[in-house]
Image (tube, helix red, strand yellow):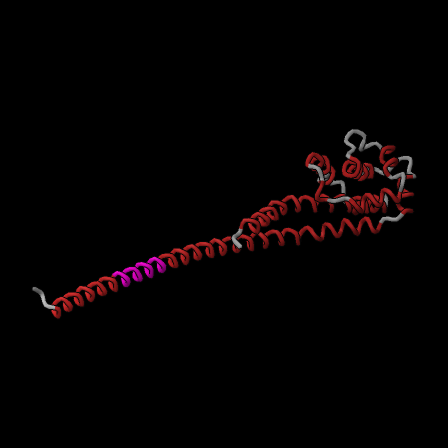
């Protein structure tokens, strides 16, 4: 028979062994949990680094596009200002004198032809002087239309029609000044509004690309 003290010792040893096993299990679980947390943090850190790298690349690309766009726009600004100044220099007397001519000096009809193309989208009778006089009939309205014309919206099909006149070697502001002050100012407007549009056409894709980069870049 096992005496009482022996049984008690056996019970204590069994209890001690059980506590050791439970402690070992607890430590293993803590170690596993710690490892899992470290792995999670490592993955999150790697993901954060990737996002940060993406953001850096996007920011660099956006800056490059923005710099290019601003450089192009800087070229467009003088043309737009010159066009606005040309209209501002026009007076009712100038235009009244021009439209009162029964027949314009050579070259002036080309100036008004460009105005008819751009302002009224007239492609058939743009070289007709009577048609040009009709366009200038309401001097105030004509000047307002010139002032409000948006060079960004110049239709693509009108570009080659205007280029024919802009690239004509006989057409210049100096030549027009000898014939009509109004024609000289109108020609200055035509040349510069056309020049502005040609620059804007190059800038718009850059601005669109910049908007796309800003929209898709990580926050």
Residue found at x 89% / y 46%: 94
Residue 16 lies in what quarter of the image? bottom left
Q: Is residue 27 magenta?
A: yes
Image mark count:
0
Name of the residue lying farthest toward the top:
124
Question: Where are the magenta residues, as a range?
Answer: 25-38
Q: Is residue 90 left or right of residue 172?
A: right
- Looking at the image, residue 12 lies above or below residue 137: below
Q: Residue furthest left?
A: 1
Q: Is residue 148 left or right of residue 48?
A: right
Q: Residue 17, image x and y in percent?
A: 19, 64
Q: Residue at x 78, y 46 (%)?
A: 189
Q: Is residue 1 left or right of residue 170?
A: left
- Is residue 2 shown left or right of residue 195? left
Please tell me whether residue 1 is drawn above or below residue 58 in the rendered image.
below
Name the quadrant containing residue 43: bottom left
Q: Residue at x 87, y 42 (%)?
A: 141
166 and 36: which is toward the camera = 36
| Residue at 85%, 47% in the rendered image | 181
56 or 11: nearer the eye?
Answer: 11
Whether residue 114 is in magenta: the answer is no
Question: Which of these two is toward me, 137 or 38?
Answer: 38
Judge by depth and name the residue closer to the eye, 23 or 168.
23
Residue 26 position, x and y percent, is: 28, 62
- What secondary structure characterizes most of the magenta part? helix
Q: In which quadrant will I find the N terminus?
A: bottom left
- Image coordinates of residue 71 in percent, x first then y, are 62, 54
Across and down, in percent, residue 144 comes to 84, 45
In the displayed orientation, state which residue is furthest to the bottom. Answer: 5
């Amino acid at each position: 028979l096992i005496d009482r003290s022996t049984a008690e010792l056996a019970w204590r040893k069994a209890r001690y062994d059980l506590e050791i096993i439970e402690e070992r299990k607890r430590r293993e679980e803590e170690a596993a949990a710690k490892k899992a947390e470290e792995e999670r943090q490592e993955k999150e850190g790697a993901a954060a680094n990737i996002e940060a790298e993406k953001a850096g690349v996007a920011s660099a690309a956006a800056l490059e596009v923005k710099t290019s766009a601003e450089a192009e726009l800087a070229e467009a600004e003088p043309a737009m200002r010159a066009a606005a100044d040309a209209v501002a220099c026009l007076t009712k007397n100038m235009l009244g004198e021009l439209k009162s001519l029964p027949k314009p000096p050579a070259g002036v009809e080309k100036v008004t032809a460009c105005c008819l193309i751009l302002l009224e989208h007239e492609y058939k009778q743009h070289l007709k002087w009577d048609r040009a006089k009709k366009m200038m009939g309401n001097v105030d309205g004509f000047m307002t239309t010139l002032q409000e014309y948006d060079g960004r919206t110049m239709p693509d099909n009108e570009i080659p029609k205007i280029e024919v006149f802009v690239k004509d070697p006989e057409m210049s502001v100096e030549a027009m000044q000898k014939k009509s002050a109004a024609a000289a100012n109108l020609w200055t407007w035509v040349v510069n509004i056309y020049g502005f549009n040609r620059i804007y056409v190059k800038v718009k894709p850059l601005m669109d690309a910049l908007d796309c980069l800003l929209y898709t870049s990580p926050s």
